[in-house]
Image (cartoon, rainbow, N blue to C red):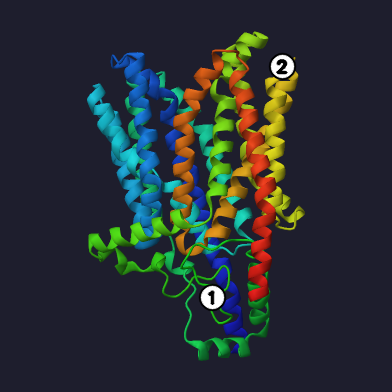
Amino acid sequence: MNQTKCSALLQKPRRQSRIIKCVYVVGFMDLFGVSMIIPLLSHHVKHLGASPTVAGIVGSTYGILQLFSSTIVGSWSDVVGRRYSLLTCLLLSSLGYGLLGLSTSITLFVVARIPVGLFKHSLSICRALLSDLVSESERPLVMGHFNAASSVGFILGPVVGGYLAEHEGGFYMSSFTCAAIFLLNAGLVWMLPWSEALVKRTDANSNSHICEICPDFNAAKSVAYQNGSSQGNNHHAVPGEELPDPGSPGPGELPPRSPRWRHVSLLRPAWRQLSSVGSRIRLVASSDMWDLFLVRLLMAIGIMLYYSNFTLAMEERFFIKPKVTGYLISYSSTLGALAGCLVGPVTQLYDKDMPALLLHSTVLTCGLIFLYAAAPSVWQVVLSSTFFAISTTIGRTCITDLELQRGGLQASGTLIGAGQSVTAIGRILAPLLSGLAQEFSPCGPPSLGVLLALSAAILLMFRIPKWRGRGKTKMAKL
């Protein structure tokens, strides 16, 4: 009897892996559908009769909407739960891409981009969901696999979109296909085994009874809790966050009354939901996380400057045709997808020291951008592109993990949304900076990217010792 109960308890993490794998599929299908449309947007806007200036303004609409909606939708997912917020985002994104397939004028095109710009945050909510499901030590590995699955979709999508675009009405066919993919994603999310993601717990007496009948489970839980504490010793919690007590759920277990899993929270009055969202955003805004967000912004702009004029620079510097440059970009993207599977082993190699790994990946990225900007031959560009995809993939995973470590899981959706808002600022600034730098030289944008990445590395060198000092102080108090 005891052996049966013990076996059931040990099987719960295995059952949780089912929902994690389903989230990987959602991420793959999401970027697969989106990447079918992205390469065709500018051509379609020009086909509708827009001037280059109007096309640029219309293209920036999405980034501006994402800037303001990322944090709000992420915080809303903390309030009403991942399931309902993810379903809402997928369904409204599907509506937007469906309207895009009906757009026969600039006005309809802009209207179609509004719901996508406001609610295309499904990947951010998926990341927040994964952070809810796994322990802190497992999070980099799971996030890396999710990024890899999503990247594969981004690689395959343009191939299918390009094939459809060759037929008459290809853009509209691609738009409706993308809308159908998001509808399928919504159906998959609806059918996810959400009940298996919940770790049902009873009162303290039943917890002690479980520990008595299953000492192996108790020992495993204690080790997980200690690992979680050691990994969290360098984070600075968002104000209001409570540290777990020994009787509370350990990493990888969901609290029984967490608002993320409360199915009735969607029925709360709208003003209460807005109040909860506002309070969570204020907590994140008042926390001492400016350094991480600044590093994210600097690196985002630096990486975008690397890619901003890549095709044009390769043609002007090495007389490489755009077709060959496209192969090089696909090669780099494929390596970036594969690098997602390397995140887990690399973090193990660093003994889960995420600040050190972030610093080293930032320095490596800075050096690779410099190598590309100063490359005298195309082979050095190929070399820099090879390792650049790996270093940026690891760096993105590290900074997301550090934001969750320092901010706490109680506001994981808000934190990830805030990070996406910071990245959206980079998307707005990077084209402007690239245009100004390109006035001087084809190597101007990556050269400016080197300076920004170097600034991020210097900032990390000064801030990491302070993060660790806070961690030691917190552990001493505990």
Relative height, residue 478 to residue 86 (above, below): below
Q: Secondary structure at mark 2?
A: helix
Q: Kindly indicate the quadrant of the structure image that contains residue 181.
A: top left
* Dot label at residue 249: 1
Q: Which residue is mark 2?
A: 378
Amino acid found under the numbered disc labelled 2: Val
- Image quarter where the C terminus lies is bottom right
Quarter of the picture holding the N terminus: bottom right
> Tag 1's secondary structure?
loop
Quadrant of res 295? top right
Name the residue rendered at 72%, 31% in the picture. 367
Foreground residue among 286 and 127: 286
Q: Is residue 403 left or right of residue 31?
A: right
368 or 108: which is nearer to us? 368
Residue 376 visible, this orientation: yes
Residue drawn at 71 percent across, 56 percent down: 353
Q: Amino acid at mark 1?
A: Pro
